[in-house]
Amino acid sequence: MIEYILGIDTSAYTTSIALIDAKENKIIDDKRKVLLVPLGQRGLRQQDAVFQHLKNFQELYSEINVDMKLISTVAVSSRPRNVDGSYMPVFTVGQNYGKIIAETLNCSYIEYSHQENHIAASLIELYKEINDDILAIHISGGTTEFLGAKKAQKGYSTEIVGGSKDITFGQLIDRIGTLMEFPFPCGLYMEKSIQNISEVDKIKIPPIKGTTFINLSGMENYYNNLYLQNKYSKETIIYSLFNYIASCILHIIKQIQSIYCFKTIIITGGVASNNTIRNLVLEELNDKLRVIFPSKVNSSDNAVGLAYLPIIDRWYNEIKTY
């Protein structure tokens, strides 16, 4: 008998719905819509994001063309992190829609965190072999966190072991990007602008201060000044910025590995979809550690991980009974 799992994620900048065939372990539908941010703005107020999610969700849900009675579970991201007190208003949209759908269909309803969604989306094909000793790096517009993660009875348990103390990698990119008049979120447009560059001038990057936790706001001023001085091309500054972020990731990983011993490193979130940053990190680490980047489409915000989480939970709890 066919059994579908519906995943719902309403994050800071994307409305996402995914439908998984639980028996075939296959994605049936994956729909996403990025929230609109007016040109020149660095983000959205939560109330504006909530309004857009309400509109987007109805549109995306109406496009799913399957027998909804075959949905056995609705899985929703209800909070940013899997800790008490973690809260953002945007997640209540998916949470409320998910509850209504589950009650209407008389099916199971389960909540996870947005970060657990990202971890699961990174391990869709590997969850049976990777369950613990994971360093999960979540880098996005709202988060720069390095998490010690392991499989729990439900979802993943995590502990922050590194990250940024002030702004995030995504905020650093977007603040420089909006100064350069790229649309928000800026990362994708900035990356496209340097695709045809074969060589770039070297910009001296200040030393990275801190150990497992670092500050980034000083580098915002640094790159702002570089751009306003008009000494280097826009493309050169962008490449240097991406190179700096990759260097920060490598620096924090090195510091963490001197304290802990993680066998697998997952790097996910919107910033992790950047090819320049991916390549620079892999160039340094690929022969030293097991590094997993999810597909570019599943690095950014999605609901695929949520739809897979009940499958992963079921498998994990079944093997624990043997």
Image: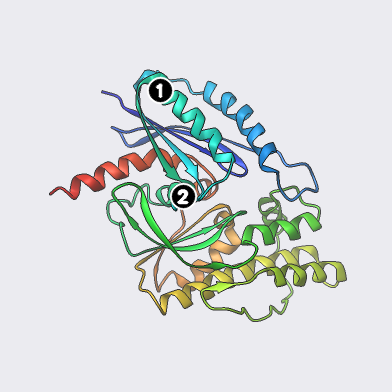
Name the foreground residue: 155 vs 59: 155
Determine whether 267 is above or below 10 in the image: below
Q: Is residue 96 left or right of residue 244?
A: left
Q: CA distance from mark 1 to mark 2?
A: 26 Å
Name the foreground residue: 161 vs 241: 161
Q: Is residue 196 left or right of residue 100?
A: right
In percent of width and height, residue 194 lies at 70, 59
In percent of width and height, residue 159 lies at 42, 62
- Report the residue at 52% width, 25% height from top: 61
Name the foreground residue: 48 vs 286: 48
Name the foreground residue: 89 vs 317: 89
Where does label 2 land, which residue? 118
In percent of width and height, residue 246 lies at 58, 68
Q: Amino acid at mark 1?
A: Glu
Residue at the right extreme of this rendering: 229
Where does label 1 land, which residue? 103
Q: Is residue 215 left or right of residue 133?
A: right
Label number found at residue 69: none
- What secondary structure is marked by label 1? helix
- Report the residue at 50% width, 70% height from top: 283
- Report the residue at 49% width, 23% height from top: 64
Q: Residues within 10 Å of mark 1 (few under 14, many from 20)?
A: few
Q: Is residue 285 visible?
A: yes
Q: How many marks?
A: 2
Q: Is residue 31 visible?
A: no
Q: Amino acid at mark 2?
A: His
Determine whether 110 is above or below 166 in the image: above
In percent of width and height, residue 74 lies at 40, 31
